[in-house]
Amino acid sequence: MAQSLSKVLLHVVFSTKNRDRIISKNIQPKLYAYTAGICRKIKSQAYRVGGTDNHIHIACSLPRTLTISKLLEELKKSSSKWLKTQDYNLKTFSWQAGYGAFSLGQSQIDDLLKYIDNQEQHHKINIQ
């Protein structure tokens, strides 16, 4: 029986519209968990989801049946819809058009996970 195998690892990142600092600290962990759930629903393995108040990083696999653009369309659409229900201040929430999507090898995943885990510190250092 023929089969198709694939393991494409991605680092994806996208920002809030106008890079508005609108994702509060209390919403962030819920958003990250919800986004990981979206990944599971579309057969993508989420290795890590994190970010800051104005953008999100996702380390995930690309499902064999989806293109990168369809993966990102689903992630952005579903998370935006969910965010709008979480807080009155987010009722008009939207993600910025576009995204970054970068492939990586298995040997790079640990460094990426650390990078995602340290987003707050990374951006604090770069702002000062």
Image: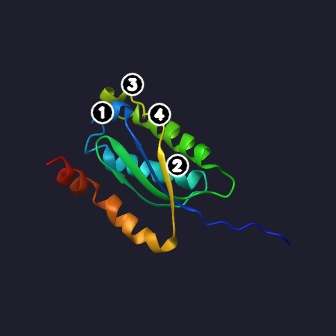
Direction from residue 123 to residue 62 in the image, left or right: right
Whether residue 128 sits left or right of residue 7 in the image: it is: left
Task: Tell me, for residue 97, which label it has, or none.
Answer: 4
Q: CA distance from mark 4 to mark 2?
A: 19 Å
Between the residue at mark 1 and the residue at mark 3, the CA separation in whole angstroms equals: 12 Å
Element carrying mark 3: loop
The first of marks 3 and 2 along the sequence is 2
Determine which of the numbered discs, if any, sits on residue 82 in the image.
none
Residue 20, which numbered label?
A: 1
Going from N to C along the chain, the mark reached first, 1 or 2, is 1
Q: Is residue 84 above or below residue 99?
A: above
Q: Nearer the viewer, residue 121 or 27?
A: 121
Labelled disc at residue 38: 2
Residue appearing at x 31%, y 40% in the figure: 54
The residue indicated by pointer 3 is 92
Query: Are circles 4 and 1 on residues that touch, CB within 8 Å?
Result: no
Quarter of the image with the N terminus is bottom right
Q: Which residue is situated farthest in the top direction here?
A: 92
Amino acid marked by disc 1: Asp
